[in-house]
Image: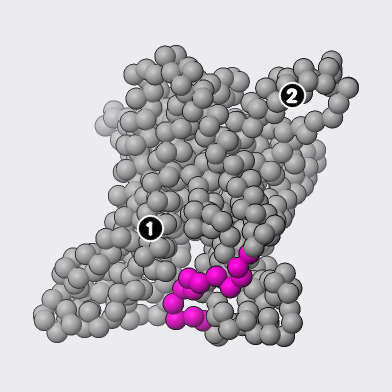
Amino acid sequence: MSDKFKLSKWQLFAWLVGLLLSAPLFFLVVESLKGDSEVFIHLWNTVLWDYIFNTVVLIFGVCFLSCFIALPLGWLTAYCHFPGKRQFEWALMLPLAMPTYIIAYVYTDLLDYAGPVQIALRQWFGWQSPDDYWFFDIRTLPGAIVMLSLVLYPYLFLIFKTALREQSFKLVQASQLMGLSPSRSFYKVSLVLSRGAIVAALALISMETMADFATVSYFAVSTLTTAVYDTWFGYYSLTAAAKISGVMLLLLFLALITERFSRRDQAVFERQTSVNSEALYQLRGKSAWFATLFCSFILAIAFVLPVAVLLSYAVTYFDSIWSNALLSYAWQSLKVATIVSVIAIVLSVFVVFYQRIAKQAHPLIPGRLASTGYALPGTVLAIAVLLPLTLIENALNTMLEPYHLNIGLLLTGSIVTIIIAYVVRFYAIAHGAIESSFVRISPSLDMASQSMGKSQSQTLRLVHLPLLRRGILTAALLVFIECMKELPAALLLRPFNFESLATHVFQYVSDEQLELASLSALLIVVVGLVPLYFINRSMESRS
């Protein structure tokens, strides 16, 4: 009887977490269905279709360019041996530490008409005006596609490379015996077997692309994300902004349904028992050096060059940059990121533990509900979180009015709103990492603990948590860096006199002063390298 009672407590907690973290999405849908839609109708009849078109083109462009970059890189590092392969296996993931808006700011500063590249070209060739020559305009939709692809391709690279190394080499070797060249084997065998992993990675890239605000805003590319921001702060219509958010959610929903439908009859049955570590192809001569050159080029433009520019600016302008205010911004970022990481880890551990011990039907539903926030772009998330919190504040103020008390903006006027928004958005990251770690713990350990008379709570504390240390650390670091990088939600929800490193960078870059934000940008990048280091170590230990 006691076990039943304890299980019901875990069940109640898991469902409570799932319902609370999915509540903002529910309020957003309700708000988008309200009848006050004059602003939305005006936008629908004028510019909204252009926003939708730009968003769709941006997503498809980033996915295509990411495939062009990541698939060859993944195949080379998984199946081929060439100079520098061991270093490129982890170095090509480094751009993940670079927020998209930072690389966009750096390349705009370098490649704009007043930037050093075009100035040097005009001096070398004697050009006098833009009419004398053509140069790629970075602040356009194609420019945004390039910038986002340079930062997001590692998602596909990592997932595709892992999928290739988990495939049986026998299939590729069989294709060689049938006379297929390496390139035809890549198209006929490797891509087909990895289709599910590729589509899953592209779905993730699509969500990250749709969620981007700073890059498209800085490049003056009108997308649905910027439309939400402009409608909220330009027309002061929360309902119209919610309706546009509903359009974004519909696009995401259709993309996910299409992805699931496309793989409905797909199954892969042959797997390696361990990760492949030997190379199938020994590249020599021109092929080997071409592979090294291609990897080096991508790494240089996606990470090395932007970091070098930021370092140069930080050293040159250090006296103007360093101040107590910068330390304050760093502290604000660290404080919020740490609090969110701890909350997300605690909630995810309890919810995943419930999934493990639950004997009721559908134990995965609470975790899936709680993870829905990750699909919400930052601007949409801000509205979704603000709606219930505003309702709660108004209700509390109404209840306290007879007592001449007023809590004011206790929730929406403090960092509580940002913390709640970050937990809603990044809980899914912690849940996924904890869930994958729990799967590796043998159920026999649970039975052994139970046979020794330990309760479920004691089993979690004494058995599971020590074994989950690496997974918890990885999850905490991933949530931490995402909080440090998050910009749209912080811009929309921050209280007065609150600045994070991300908003500090955005403020200076908006004023065309990247040099004064270089140190803040470098701090964000350096913090982002920490989880990549641990992820790489974890992958090496399993290979």
Question: Could you tell which of marks 1 and 2 lies nearer the N-terminus?
Answer: 2
Q: Which mark is on residue 537?
A: 1
Q: Bounds of the magenta span?
A: 271-283
* Image point (64%, 32%), residue name: 107
* 536 magenta-colored: no
Where is residue 534 drawn, in percent x and y? 37, 54
Please give left or right for residue 187 compared with residue 98 in the image: right
* Image point (60%, 47%), residue name: 296
Figure coloring: one colour
Q: Can residue 422 be seen in this view?
A: yes
Badge 2 element = helix
Badge 1 element = helix
Q: Which mark is on residue 428?
A: none
Q: In which quarter of the image is the C terminus?
A: bottom left
Q: Quadrant of the N terminus?
A: bottom left
Residue type (three-letter) at the residue carrying disc 2: Gln
Q: Which mark is on residue 118?
A: 2
Where is residue 215 drawn, in percent x and y? 62, 36
